[in-house]
Amino acid sequence: CMRKEEKKSTHTHNIIIMVVHVVLEEKINASANDVWNIVGKKFGDLSWTTVVSECRVMEASEIPEGYTAIKEAPVTGRIVNGPIGGEIFEILTAYSEREKSLTFDAPNCFGPFVKLATNKTTIKSTSWSTSTITTELNWEMNPIFGCLESVVEKRIQSSDKGPNGLLLDLKAHFEKKAKK
């Protein structure tokens, strides 16, 4: 976990923002290209996971203020109904097909707990038929919930819901495909 100091407007005091930092990694029995096709090229389609109940592509008119569309990306972002309910706007902020890497922001997600979630996902080839997906999460907690930072960190790492659940579902998706 990290602490980040942020100066607000012209006031002389500092506000401490608690940042939960977690790195998740999963070996997938599929090529990096196959995994990227689902995670990157089809960013707006989460039909392969049980973690979210609904997902749709974000229209350009729905991009929150302060964000712009990434021209290289197939979509602007997605809107999901998350594991604890409510809509989560996931806006792509970086996208590289060559590096098989993407980053998205999810402002004000998970109810009042998370001020800004930034997730960076990278897929690396480990052989012609296997790859590793790594997701680096940096979640700025709203100050009142900063005391829950270690609980949130453990929950992210162990839960079959949220980011860890997505990776487990992705792995299961390719294992089912391999058995067919």
Image (tube, grey):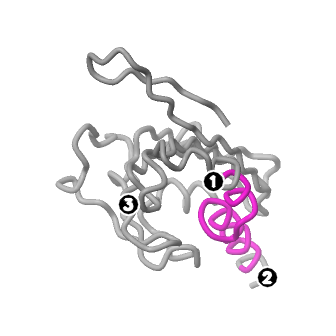
Q: Secondary structure at mark 1?
A: helix
Q: Is residue 118 above or below residue 172?
A: above
Disc 2: which residue: 179
- Name the N-terminal-most of marks 2 and 1: 1
Q: Residue furthest bottom?
A: 180
Q: The C terminus is located in which quarter?
A: bottom right
Q: Secondary structure at mark 3?
A: strand
Segment tinted magenta in the rendering: 153-176
**Rendering coords of residue 117 (x, y %):** 49, 47
Give residue 129's quadrant in the image: bottom right
Disc 3: which residue: 78
Give residue 27's quadrant in the image: bottom right
What amino acid type is highlighted by mark number 2? Answer: Lys
- Name the N-terminal-most of marks 2 and 3: 3
**Mark 3: few/some/many CA within 10 Å (<14, 14-19, 20+):** many
Asked whether 178 falls inside the magenta stretch, the response is: no
**Rendering coords of residue 143 (x, y %):** 48, 42
Q: Secondary structure at mark 2?
A: helix
**Rendering coords of residue 136 (x, y %):** 63, 43
What amino acid type is highlighted by mark number 1? Answer: Asn
